[in-house]
Image: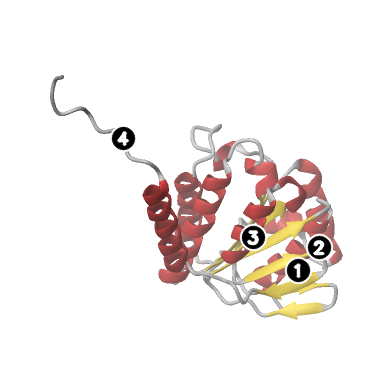
Amino acid sequence: MDLSVDGKSERIPYSSHICQLYSKVTEIAGVTARLLRAGIVASEKCLFAAAPAQVQELREELVKLQLDVDALIAKGQLILSSEREPFLSNGKRFDPYFLLSTHQTFITQALRDGWKAVRISIDMTWLAGELATPEQLLKYEALCDAVFTFQNRPIIALMHYDYGKLLPSLVVEMLKLHPISVVGKFIRRNPYYLNSEQYMIKILRMHREKERKEPGPPERGGGRD
């Protein structure tokens, strides 16, 4: 199975993006290793980006799954990155559109090189924690849903967030953008999932409602006393 947590498994189709909300950063490696192993066996190209300690933990988990990590890296099927700059605009600014474009480029190059599909996993708290606003994170997730799902892209993306560092309201909105989420030891299919089209309609309605409630500019006097 593609996604396995504490003995529970799910088959994940292409064009999926999954959210893992973790309380300890050490929760990332186990979930990600099994997801990437399934991709490696299926001749897919895989990428994992996180802090050096988490990259090392993932490497160790892949070894436990009897994968030759160095050989996979050497032949270009596996990329392990602990550098944030390639995923940030100008190497320092979080931009939802730029990050999505790196995924698109990764897919295109992988298919050109003969891989069947791709799997991408990024610790978003490490990448964007102090750089991105809540609105930017939601925009990024909505963009991924729109592009991956509606364009039927050959990708499975697993993004990790430390929910202790997210506003409660942001956690709720984040879950709405993911049909499947990993929370603690549970894989959850989300009955409140809104695809990107539905989500953007919701945002537009909220903006219109806000504009209606805001007082207009004061009227200027029409004549002289």
Residue with the mark numbered 1: 34
Give x and y (percent) for residue 25: 81, 50
For mark 4, give the secondary structure. loop
Image quarter (top left, top right, bottom left or bottom right) of the C terminus: top left
Residue at the far left: name it: 223
Secondary structure of residue under mark 1: helix
Q: CA distance from mark 3 to mark 4?
A: 34 Å
Q: CA distance from mark 2 to mark 1?
A: 7 Å
Percent across and percent down for residue 145 are: 50, 64
Name the amino acid type tagged 3: Val
- Does residue 147 appear anywhere in the picture? no
Say which quarter of the image contains residue 200. bottom left
Task: Tell which of 149 and 109 is nearer to you.
Answer: 149
- Discs 2/4, front: 4
Gap between marks 1 and 3 measured at Cα: 26 Å
Question: Label 2, on which residue?
Answer: 30
Depth check, front residue: 76 or 169: 169
